[in-house]
Image (spheres, helix red, strand yellow):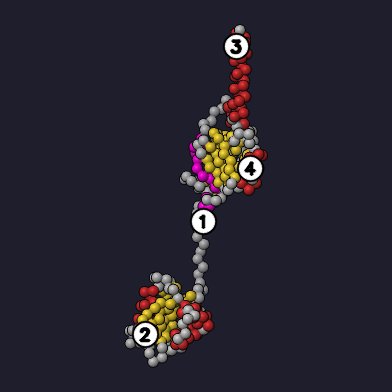
Amino acid sequence: MTRSKTTSTNTRTLLGAALLAALLPAAAWSQQQAGTQFPNNVGQYTGRWSANCADNSAPTLQVRQDTLIAESGKRRVVAREPQTVYSLFGNSPPPAGFDVALVGETGKAGALTFLVHRVSRGQLRGQYITLDTDKPLAGQLGPEMMKLRYWRCNGAERALPPPSEPAAKVPPPPTGSPAALAQGPAMQKAWRAALGSRENERWLVRREGPAPEPQWVTIDGTRYLLHAFCKPHDCYDNNAIALYDQGSGRIYGLVQRNGGNRLVGSPPAALAPQLDKLWREQWRKSN
């Protein structure tokens, strides 16, 4: 009777060990066999990891305390009870920058492994994950997801510093004499577009009336060609000014007709008071 009980106990022990070996990732099991116990540090890596942290539709990994999730569009794999594994490569040295493996089980499809790496090279700093799975899972995720790097999107360490803004293109400095530019086809075309196709009053469309000498003026760092002109024999109540930006080809203006003023060319709000000031200098100070 005693011998029978002993045999039964030994059988249950072996079965329990075999079941434990099947449930644990192979590397973790080898650690325990060797008598080395490592704490489970999955909590250090929780959060969202993405191929592009700024794009919510990009392939993404999620590390949670109790699950690992890999998803892209309709593709989604969930692994349960993740463990941290530090000796995944056995006696071989780990790749440069390798931190830890996060390993979770999906059931019959096998283990889902997130390989966490750390990089510090120039401006490239932070942590990223690459995928390592059994073939059935690799087929579910697809080759594109398997080859990507997933950067850490939360926490103190991020993948990359934000990219610097590209330098604004500086328009070339204005060229040519003010008088020649004022009468040239480029400014005339811009002025016609600013007025609109319905405008047909000759002095206004062609800028043919009496006019002071065109000149350069600088407003908020932009240099404009200022051209003022008026209706022949009726300058006080029918006149205009035009500001031409040679770099952008845009033109803005203020027109007074029959005593009423209107802006043309859709000038920015900050430019409207400057147009009014220039208009008064041209048509009110000396009249």
Query: Residue 225 location, x and y as percent?
Result: 45, 79
**Alpha carbon distance from label 2 to label 4:** 75 Å
User: Vertical placement of 132 versus 243: above or below?
Assistant: above
Residues marked 2 and 3 touching at CB (< 8 Å)? no
Q: Tag 4: residue type?
A: Gln
Identify the element where label 3 is drawn. helix
Q: Which mark is residue 258?
A: 2
Q: Nearer the viewer, residue 125 or 197?
A: 197
* Label drawn at residue 5: 3
Q: Relative to 283, does residue 64 appear above or below in the rendering?
A: above
The answer to whether the residue labelled 2 contacts the one labelled 4, judged by CB atoms less than 8 Å apart, is no
Which labelled disc corresponds to residue 140? 4
Question: Residue at label 1?
Answer: 163
Q: Nearer the viewer, mark 2 or mark 3?
A: 2
Residue 76 as seen in the image, left or right of residue 226: right
Any part of residue 131 in sight: yes
Q: Give the class, few, some or many, for how many residues have Cα within 10 Å of label 3's Cα (few <14, many ≥20).
A: few
Where in the figure is residue 100, as x and y percent of width and height?
Answer: 56, 38
The residue segment tinted magenta is 41-55
* Label 1: how many Cα within 10 Å (few below 14, some 14–19, many 20+): few
Inspect this view and state whether residue 125 appears: no
Q: Amino acid at mark 1?
A: Pro
Q: Looking at the image, is mark 2 or mark 4 earlier in the sequence?
A: 4
C-alpha span from label 4 to label 1: 34 Å
Q: Quadrant of residue 232?
A: bottom left
